[in-house]
């Protein structure tokens, strides 16, 4: 019994040490974009925001865009920094993985932040040379949400002043026209 307990204890300790080391590391989308052939056929995990549109197909799949940039984690309206262009990849997954997803990101909407795991396909001949992640597992890290820019006083005041100038100009024109 003591040997069995010792063996189980050793197995638990080894699993605790080896488990985190064996976990899938998150690959930045930039790596897939800059060196796409290096990971062709490999299982990778990419983290980012689902954006644009969910394109459900008749073959039971869904295509969308996964943006992996600073804006996915901290949008500009939330005080995020300007860090250049968006960085993203196309993803394809079984439609069942998208059943309970929040709407994709877009103007005034932050899409769900997810970790997508699957096989990286570089110039897949079965898909007309498309490069994309064939997702087999999708984990929602953070739910999507509405983005609120709030009212900006300078454009509001400028707009109100323009309306007043236009009204004054129109009334002045009518006054001059009526005198003639």
Image (tube, helix red, strand yellow):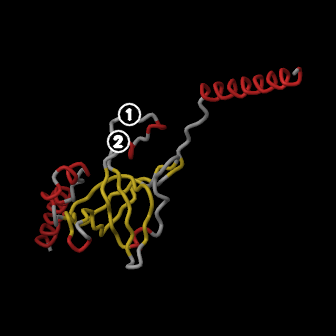
Give the quarter of the figure containing the N terminus: bottom left
- Which mark is drawn over residue 134? none
Do callouts 1 and 2 mark residues in contact (Cβ within 8 Å)? Answer: yes
In the rendered structure, the answer to whether residue 28 lies left or right of residue 55 reads left
The quadrant in which the C terminus is found is top right
Read off the residue under disc 2: 70
Residue at image x 68%, y 26%?
162
Label 1 sits on a secondary structure element that is: loop
In three-dimensional space, the C-alpha distance between marks 1 and 2, rounded to whole angstroms, equals 8 Å
Residue at coordinates 36% horizontally, 73% vertically from top-left?
A: 94
Q: Residue furthest toward the right?
A: 179
101, above or below 109, in the image: below
Residue at the extreme bottom of the image, as rendered: 59
Which residue occupies 24% across, 62% down?
Answer: 131
> Quick check: 139 left or right of 33?
right
Q: Residues within 10 Å of mark 2 (few under 14, many from 20)?
A: some
List x then y, in percent, for residue 13: 16, 60
Residue 142 pos. (x, y %):
42, 53
Crowd band around label 1 with a 10 angstrom C-alpha radius: few (<14), some (14–19), many (20+)? few
In primary-sequence order, the first of circles 1 and 2 is 2
Question: x and y percent of residue 39 in the render?
Answer: 15, 59
Up the image or down, 100 lies above or below 161; here it is below
Q: Nearer the viewer, residue 39 or 163?
A: 163
Q: Nearer the viewer, residue 75 or 172?
A: 172
Q: Looking at the picture, does residue 5 appear above or below residue 26?
A: below
Q: Give the quadrant of residue 16.
A: bottom left
Tell me: 175 left or right of 28: right
Reading the image, the residue beneath label 1 is 81
């Amino acid at each position: 019994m003591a040997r069995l307990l010792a063996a189980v204890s050793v197995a638990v300790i080894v699993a605790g040490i080896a488990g985190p080391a064996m976990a899938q590391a998150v690959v930045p989308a930039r790596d897939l974009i800059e060196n796409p052939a290096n990971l062709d056929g490999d299982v990778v995990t990419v983290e980012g925001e689902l954006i644009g549109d969910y394109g459900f197909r008749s073959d039971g799949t869904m295509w969308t865009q996964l943006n992996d940039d600073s804006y996915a984690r901290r949008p500009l309206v939330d005080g995020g920094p300007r860090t250049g262009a968006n960085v993203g990849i196309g993803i394809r997954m079984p439609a069942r993985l998208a059943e309970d997803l929040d709407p994709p990101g877009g103007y005034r909407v932050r899409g769900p932040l997810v970790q997508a795991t699957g096989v990286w396909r570089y110039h897949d001949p079965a898909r007309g040379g498309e490069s994309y992640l064939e997702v087999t597992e999708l984990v929602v890290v953070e739910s999507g949400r509405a983005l609120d820019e709030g009212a900006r006083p300078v454009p509001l005041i400028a707009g109100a002043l323009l309306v007043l100038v236009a009204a004054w100009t129109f009334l002045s024109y009518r006054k001059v026209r009526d005198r003639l």
